[in-house]
Image (cartoon, rainbow, N blue to C red):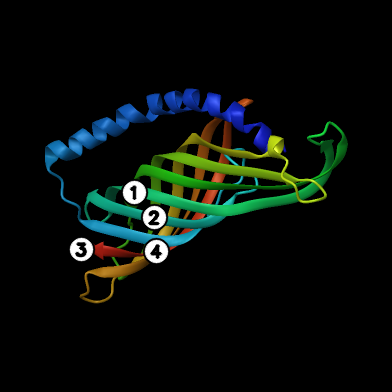
Amino acid sequence: NKTIMNANRCQWTDSLRIKNVWRVVALPALVVLSSLLSANVVAQTANLALGYSSMPGSLGERNSDHGVAIRLGVEFLGGRHLKWGVEAGLDFLNEDRRQYTTTCFLPDGSTGPCHFDSSGQDTGISLGTVLRMYPGSSKVRPYGVVGVGLLRNSSHQTQMAVDDFGNPLTNFVGDFRYNEEAIQIHLGAGVTTNLGSLPFGPYVEGRASRLFYGCSGGLCASWNPTVVVGIRLGGGW
């Protein structure tokens, strides 16, 4: 199984990728955080959304590439037409399961049929900053979104094998976990509205996020489109 065989390679390259990404992201993030703390900034609006995420490319398990997206954010600064804030995200992607039979070496030294059952699943955790731009002042307000973030993709891969009699082939059993990091560049649009005098309102938002991460060929990039439906709590419409 190519994915399982590559897991050990990913484990030792993971530490290098972490260092390279954090050199780019950590310093700006610390500057922003210290500015917020020193200014005693109070959140104006909170956002909670649920939707769909598609994450094809070479990051993590190739066939675990779509699933549920959860977004939680707060907006700190800005007027009626510009709002800046921070956002955390979770992407629970699908499990990719494969079952196949091939010839391999059995424990007694002979060769024979081996029945494999392997699976792989990715989970993404992200943290970033976003700027929303509201050009209008009507009750229903379209807006644009730009932002940057850091994504950690956690992969869990397992493999089991048995012979024709159901006996486990322990030399082919594997259970691997590894993490990979990516820088996110967000670009999107949405529409929101308020519900009369109520302090909350629904919104729909779509993004085409560009991911940059290390891979065997150097620097790789892929798209991560998402669409979410959520609730915005607080004032400042």
Task: Tell me which numbered mark, 3 or 1, is placed earlier along the sequence.
Answer: 1
Which class describes the residues within 10 Å of circle 2: few (<14), some (14-19), or many (20+)?
some
Task: Tell me which numbered mark, 3 or 4, is placed earlier along the sequence.
Answer: 4
Q: Amino acid at mark 3?
A: Gly
Q: Look at discs 4 and 1 and give the one toward the viewer.
A: 1
In the image, taking residue 216 as reference, residue 67 lies left or right, namely left
| Image marks 2 and 1: residues in contact by CB distance under 8 Å | yes
Q: Amino acid at mark 4?
A: Val
Expressed as whole percent of the image width and height from the top left, the position of residue 204 reads 42, 64
In the image, taking residue 153 as reference, residue 48 lies left or right, namely left
Can I make out residue 213 in this image? Answer: yes
* Placement of the C terminus among the 4 image quadrants: bottom left
Task: Tell me which numbered mark, 2 or 1, is placed earlier along the sequence.
Answer: 2
Give the residue displayed 58% in from the left and 29% down from the top. 10
Q: Amino acid at mark 1?
A: Glu
Can I make out residue 2 in this image? Answer: no
Mark pair 2, 3: CA separation: 19 Å
Q: Which residue is mark 1?
A: 87
Q: Which mark is residue 235?
A: 3
Give the residue displayed 43% in from the left and 62% down from the top. 50
Q: Which residue is mark 4?
A: 191
Q: Which residue is mark 2?
A: 71
Residue that lies at the very extreme toward the front in this rendered image = 108
